[in-house]
Image (cartoon, coloured by chain):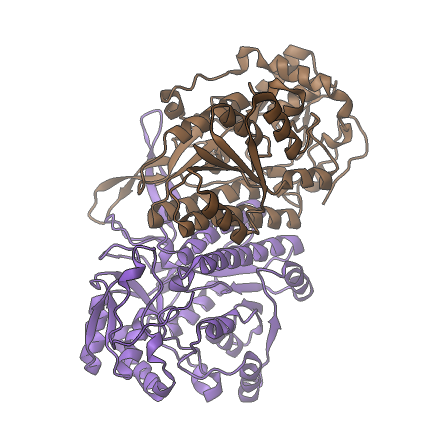
Chain colours: A purple, B brown
C-alpha cells in the first residue's frame, strides 16, 4: 500500500513509519516538524539523541534498502499544498498523527490554548476536506485518545466509541440507540480530539469517507523492533513536565535518582499501551477499514489500566526510587475507576505486551544511558489548568527555583 | 448593563443591538463586517437597502439620543486586540453572533468549508479564552442552532440541550444520566455549532464561565419595533440561495412573482421564530444567567414547527404564488417529524408571535417595496452538499442560465 503518515516524525509517527516500511508499504511522511520547534521553544530535548528526519530516513535506507519519503507540509496552514500533494500521490491510506498532543502544553497559556485548537482542528479538517475534494478513496486512520471519554465513573465499562442508551419516547416506550460516547474532555488538547470526532462523524455521513479513530491510552516504552536496529533510528523519549507521560517519566526519574512525582493522591486510573503494541494496532486498523458509507470505526487502543499510585509503587519496588506526592496541576477528580473494553483489537489478533513482561527494565536502561542529557529543572509539571491552581505549583522535589515558559 | 454584541452588524445582531440599547443598556458592537464582504463576494445584496454600520448608529443616536459604539475587530484572527478591548472595557455580558451562519455557503466549495470551520471555531474559542485570561465575569450568550440536534426521528421530543438517558452498568442496573443531546449536524455550518457546544462545556467545567447557548430555529420576518423607527435603521433581508432562509424566501418569491421553491418533497419539518421574538428571547436569557460553576444553560429559541410543503401552501394561499418542487441540494432525509420543547422561554414570559398573527403580510409588503432590487438569477439554491448532488441542480424555475460562485 501507498501510505501517507501525517506527523510521521513524532513519538508514535516515527516507529509507525518504520514498522510499515518494514512490512513492505510505500511510506510518505508529511510533517511540519512542529514538535522539534516546541522542543526549542521549551528549551528541552528528547532524552534520546534524535537525528533530523532526513538523516533518520537516510539511515533506514542504508540499513534496509527501503526508502521513506519526507514532505515538509504544514497541514493546518497549507491546505492547497496538501491537496495538490494528495491529488498527485493518491495514497490508499492516510494515518493522521499531525496534532499537538500534550495536555499540559495545551493548558500553558492563552497562546498555547489557541495554538492547540487552531492547529488541531484545522489540520484534521483540512485533511478531510482535501480527501473529499480530490475524490481519492483513502482510508483515514486517526490517533485519538482515551481522554475523549473523560474519567467520570458511572459504573459502565467504556465501550469502543459507541454507547448503547435507552431514550424515553413521547409514547412512553424506551427506544435503544447507540450514540457516540458523550464527550467529557479534561484539557484543551483532549477537547480538540472530541472536536475531531464530530468532524469525522460528519464527513463519514455526508461524504462516505472511510475513517477509523483510535482512542489510545498512555503510551509507554520507547523502542520498537525497528528503532532498535541502529543508534540513529532511536525514538524520541520525553521526560519534561509537558510532554513526558506518566509511566515513562517514573522510569526516567528512577533511572536518574529523582523522586517519582505523583500529582495529587495518585488515585487516578489510566489506560496504558506499549509503543510496540501501538504500531501493531495501527497496522491492524489499516488492514480492517470500515466500508464506505458506514459510521466511523472506533477502537480503544489500550491493553491494561493502572492507578497512578500503584505504578509509582511498582517502579519504586523495581528501582528503589522514592515517591513524592505533589499538588496536582490538573483540574480532575482525585480518583476514578476505569474499565475499558478493548475486545476488537484482541479479536484481530493483538497479543498485548504487559507491564509484567519485563520491558520496564529496558526503559530504565535507556534512561540510564542518556541520563547525562537530563535538565532536572524541567522535570516538574508546571502547566496549571486554572489560575487558581497555578500558585500551588511551587513544589520542586529538589527545591530548586522552578522554570516556566509561557 | 454594559453589553458587547459580537457580530452586531448582522441580521439578528443589529436588531438585538437596537432592542437592548432601547432598554437602556450600554451597547458595544464588535464586528469584522464579514457578512458585507460575503455580499460582495457573492455579488448579491440585502433586499432592503442597508446603510453602513457607522451611518446606522448615527441615525440611532439622532432618533433616540442613545449611542451604540462600534469596534472593527476580527474575532477569529485578532485575539490580542479583542483581549485588550475586553480588559479595558470589562462588559458584564457578551452576546456572540460572530460566526458564518449560512449552511449553503458553508458547503459551497472546499474554500468555504475551511473558512467556516476556521472562522467559527477560532472566533468562539478566542472569546472563551479571552474571558478566562482577562478574568472578567461576563455572562456569555451564544446563538446556536436547532440544527445541532439534527432531524432524525426517534419518537422523543427534542429537549432543551440535555437528554435524559438510561445507561446499563456492569452490575446489571440502569443508571439515569442527563447528557448533551447527541450532535447530528447536517452541514459544515451546523457542525461548527456542535463544536462550539463542546468548547462551552469545557470552559464552563474547567473555568466556571457562565454560558448560555440558544438553539434557534429559522428566523422569519425582518422588522422589529426599533428597526421600524427610521428608514435607515432597516434590517438586512436576504433572498439569495445561500443566505435567504425558507419562509422569508417564500414571502419574497411571492412578492416578486417568482415560484415558491421547495427543495425535495417539502416533507422536512423545521422550527421557526419571528425576529421580534428572537431579540426578546436574547433579553430574557441575559436576565437569567446560569450560576458560576454550573453547566451551560441551553434554551430552544423557537416558537412553532412547520413542514416546508405546508409553509409553501400557506404562502401560496395568501398570495396566489405558484409552488415548484426542485431537486434538493442538501443531503438530508426527505421528511422528518420534529417535536421541540421550549417551555423555558415561555416560563420566563415569552408570548410568541405566530405565523397566524398577520405578520406574514408585513414581510410581503417589505419585499414588494424593494422588489426592484432583486437579481432573480441569484434566487436558486446552487450549493450542493456533495459532488454527486451537484449535477442535479440544473433546474432554474425561470429557465435562465444559473450562476454559481465558488
Q: Is residue B399 left or right of residue A209?
A: right
Where does the N terminus of chain B fall, quadrant-wise?
top left
Q: Is residue A197 left or right of residue B325?
A: left
Where does the C terminus of chain B fall, quadrant-wise?
top right
Please tell me which residue is depicted at 76% across the width and 25% down the height of the picture: B373
Q: Quadrant of residue A12?
A: bottom left
Question: Which sits in the foreground, A231 or A330?
Answer: A330
Question: Which sits in the foreground, A196 or B204?
Answer: B204
Please tell me which residue is depicted at 65% across the width and 27% down the height of the picture: B237
Residue B78 visible? The answer is yes
Up-down relation of residue B168 to residue A136 (above or below) = above
Question: Which sits in the foreground, A185 or B213?
Answer: B213
Q: Quadrant of residue A388?
A: bottom left
Up-down relation of residue A169 to residue A262 (above or below) = above
Residue B261's x, y, as percent?
Answer: 68, 25
Residue B326's x, y, as percent?
Answer: 68, 29
**Image mark count:** 0
Residue B33's x, y, as percent?
Answer: 63, 40
Amino acid at each position: 500500500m501507498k501510505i501517507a503518515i501525517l506527523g510521521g516524525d513524532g513519538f508514535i509517527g516515527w516507529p509507525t513509519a518504520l514498522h510499515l516500511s518494514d512490512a513492505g508499504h510505500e511510506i510518505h511522511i508529511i510533517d511540519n516538524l512542529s514538535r522539534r520547534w516546541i522542543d526549542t521553544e521549551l528549551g528541552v530535548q528528547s532524552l534520546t539523541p534524535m537525528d533530523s528526519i532526513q538523516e533518520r530516513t537516510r539511515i533506514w535506507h542504508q540499513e534496509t534498502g527501503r526508502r521513506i519519503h519526507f514532505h515538509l507540509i504544514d497541514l493546518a496552514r497549507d491546505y492547497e499544498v496538501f491537496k495538490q500533494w494528495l491529488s498527485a500521490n493518491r495514497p490508499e491510506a492516510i494515518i493522521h498523527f499531525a496534532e499537538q498532543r500534550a495536555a499540559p502544553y495545551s493548558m500553558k497559556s492563552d497562546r498555547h490554548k489557541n495554538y492547540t485548537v487552531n492547529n488541531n482542528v484545522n489540520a484534521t479538517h483540512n485533511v478531510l476536506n482535501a480527501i473529499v475534494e480530490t475524490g481519492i478513496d483513502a482510508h483515514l486512520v486517526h490517533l485519538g485518545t482515551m481522554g475523549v471519554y473523560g474519567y467520570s465513573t458511572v459504573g459502565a465499562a467504556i465501550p469502543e466509541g459507541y454507547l448503547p442508551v435507552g431514550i424515553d419516547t413521547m409514547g412512553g416506550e424506551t427506544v435503544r440507540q447507540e450514540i457516540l460516547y458523550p464527550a467529557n474532555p479534561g484539557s484543551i488538547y483532549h477537547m480538540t480530539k472530541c472536536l475531531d470526532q464530530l468532524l469525522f462523524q460528519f464527513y463519514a455521513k455526508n461524504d462516505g469517507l472511510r475513517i477509523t479513530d483510535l482512542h489510545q491510552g498512555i503510551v509507554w516504552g520507547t523502542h520498537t523492533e525497528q528503532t532498535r536496529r541502529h543508534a540513529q533510528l532511536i525514538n524520541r523519549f520525553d521526560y519534561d513536565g509537558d510532554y513526558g507521560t506518566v509511566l515513562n517519566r517514573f522510569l526516567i526519574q528512577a533511572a536518574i535518582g529523582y523522586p517519582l512525582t505523583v500529582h495529587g493522591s495518585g488515585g487516578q486510573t489510566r489506560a496504558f499501551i506499549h509503543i510496540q503494541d501501538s504500531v501493531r494496532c495501527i497496522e491492524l486498523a489499516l488492514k480492517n477499514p470500515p466500508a464506505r458509507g458506514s459510521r466511523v470505526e472506533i477502537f480503544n487502543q489500550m491493553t491494561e489500566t493502572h492507578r497512578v499510585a500503584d505504578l509509582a509503587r511498582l517502579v519504586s519496588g523495581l528501582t528503589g526510587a522514592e515517591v513524592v506526592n505533589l499538588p496536582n496541576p490538573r483540574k480532575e477528580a482525585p480518583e476514578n475507576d476505569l474499565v475499558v473494553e478493548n475486545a476488537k483489537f484482541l479479536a484481530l489478533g493483538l497479543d498485548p505486551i504487559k507491564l509484567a513482561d519485563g520491558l520496564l527494565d529496558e526503559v530504565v536502561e535507556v534512561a540510564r544511558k542518556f541520563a547525562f542529557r537530563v535538565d532536572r529543572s524541567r522535570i516538574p509539571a508546571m502547566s496549571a489548568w486554572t489560575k487558581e491552581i497555578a500558585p500551588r505549583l511551587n513544589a520542586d522535589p529538589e527545591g530548586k527555583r522552578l522554570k516556566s515558559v509561557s
